[in-house]
Image: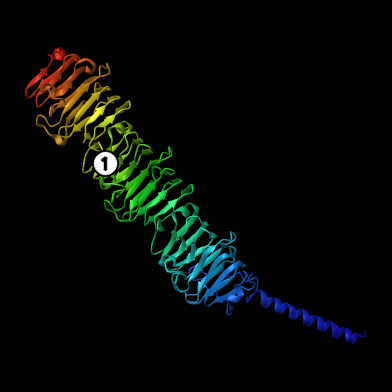
Amino acid sequence: MSVERLKISLLFVGLFCAFLSACESATDADTPENNTARPDATNPIDSSCPERVLLTQEDLNGGPSLRRKCYRVEQRLTVTRGLFKLKPGTSIVFSADAGLRFSHTGGIAAVGTADEKITFSGTAQARGHWRGLYFDASNTTQSKLAHVVLAHAGSAPWHTGRRSQAGVYLQSNASSLSISNSTFAKNARAALFAESGDALFSLDNTAFIDNESPLWLHANQIGRLASLSFSENDNAYILTGITPQEVTTDQIWKAFELPYRAEHTLSIQAKLNIDPGVTIEFKKDAGVEVGRDGALIAQGTGNKRVSLSGVDKARGAWKGIYFNRSASSENRLAFARVEYAGGAPWRWDASTAGVYLRGSENQLTIRDTIFRENAAAALFADGASVALSVESSTFENNALPIWLKPNAVGQLGEGNRFADNDAAYILLGVDGSAGEVSTSQTWLGQPVPYRARQPIEVTGDLRISPGTTLTFEQDLGLTVDGGSLRADGSGGRRIKFIAADDKTSPGSWAGIFFIRSKSDKNIIANADILYGGGRKWHGGASSQANIFLRGGGSVDSSLALSNVKIAGSAKYGISVEDGSTIAPCENVRLSNNTHEDISGDGASACR
């Protein structure tokens, strides 16, 4: 080969290689590969994209992998199969009301890096310019947004429901999406809405900036949130319970700088842990129902309480917490706050409360919790054998602090505080029949009295601690039938059995009646029994007394009295029928009893 011909051949090869290089460059990107310019998260249009490639429906069929970095979309496009893949640094701008929909096996893998984020934004940098990303039963598990900025979306709903208007809208339990290390900015309606409770969804290390609303989530998805930040959003809360919703998977609700807000009732059918510092606000008639298979653990700390409150800060602003036969021993309110609840009944009028426990199957431990500004009762349990423990808790400015059946009173512990409640007492008795105390228990003295609104019948062993005050409404009293009563205030403040509403007229309540109780545990000491004898315990006139012991064979009873004041009876102070006895009867002071102080030979020790 001549030298001249060799030179020509080499020149041709060089020109051909240069041509190939130019083609490859044009295919891979509109800007140099090493361009690492990072757009502003709130105004993310990439100024380094002077020209953009138009994406059409034909381009997206089958789930392509984009090689360039600068694109535009001018209509709503759909990926029904395959994975739409974007490389780090890709920028896509959307014309008015344009968007991307993913359904069936179609999905998206938009995975950028910290230095080369992927951006989805509007051709106009304003809220609600383009439609957004719609995952419509997109069942591929590979859909992922990482190191993404999504802005200016939410122009209109994706379907007839207005709730479908969001920057990213995840619909159907079949959908799947993972989001991490991303930013949602300047989106109309909601930046992100995960509508379905069982969709495969996660959201981590993501910022929400200057959106109309940052997050709308099904309640069952809240446990999948982690490391989120929020700033300058119009609606400064995470919205959930958009319809009545169930929590069906065990999960933890973490504390963020925003509260959660529930529009409808949340039904807990799994174990829900609420972290210290979490605030949940409920709209009118919304609340929490803990079902048979559910458990609620609201465990705060001394300086980070769990707060369950109303959107409106007024009594009855929301429904409250309803334990519907939840037998979980993990149910717990500790260092929590329950306020502004009791707005509507759960079942019948009396089921209106800040916390309502239905039936005896429930278990609940309450420690160091504040109940305030609740309509009706702050705490109401209608089961006689409910496993309820209440200690070191505060009841303030409620319509009524506590309402229980008498058999549950022994589960009220020490350290409870009461202030400025409309009804300054603990109400006993749920229906018109007698409230039975069938288990061995101790009633501790609380800072407010107990008030009986139905007869109390003791068939177990009841101890009443020093400082306890029991008040009774008209014609009501306490019967010890086969059980025992030890009301011993010795060594402490006196125990009081008196009429409700501070009535001081003779016969304002029925009194104390012993039958079939020959127990040596029956003791009343360092106590006052005042203004009873309001009715006969049976047909005989002798049964009308502050203290009455029935006698006659199998119904005989016995009682010891020490340092007791008995006064103001409408008939007798003490009446004891044959066969029953009061002994010893020491330092008993009887006065102002309408008929006689003592009736019956069995009370001879008191004469």
Applied colour scheme: rainbow
Q: Quadrant of the C terminus?
A: top left
Instruction: Using residue 15 as the reference point, say whether residue 135 is left or right of it.
Output: left
For the residue pair 523 and 438, the one nearer the viewer reads as: 438
Instruction: Give the secondary structure at mark 1.
Output: strand
In which quarter of the view is residue 548 placed? Answer: top left
Near mark 1 (Cα within 10 A), the count class, few <14, some 14-19 or many ≥20, is: many
Number of numbered discs = 1
- At horizontal 19% and vertical 29% (from top left) the residue drawn is 477
- At horizontal 15% and vertical 22% (from top left) the residue drawn is 565
- At horizontal 44% and vertical 54% (from top left) the residue drawn is 219
From this view, report whether residue 201 is shown above or below residue 292. below
Q: Amino acid at mark 1?
A: Pro
From this view, report whether residue 101 is shown above or below residue 292. below
Task: Name the residue that disc number 1 marks.
Answer: 401
Q: Residue furthest right?
A: 1
From this view, report whether residue 167 is shown above or below residue 422. below
In which quarter of the view is residue 545 placed? Answer: top left
Q: Is residue 465 visible?
A: yes
Q: Position of residue 304 (x, y in %)?
A: 40, 46
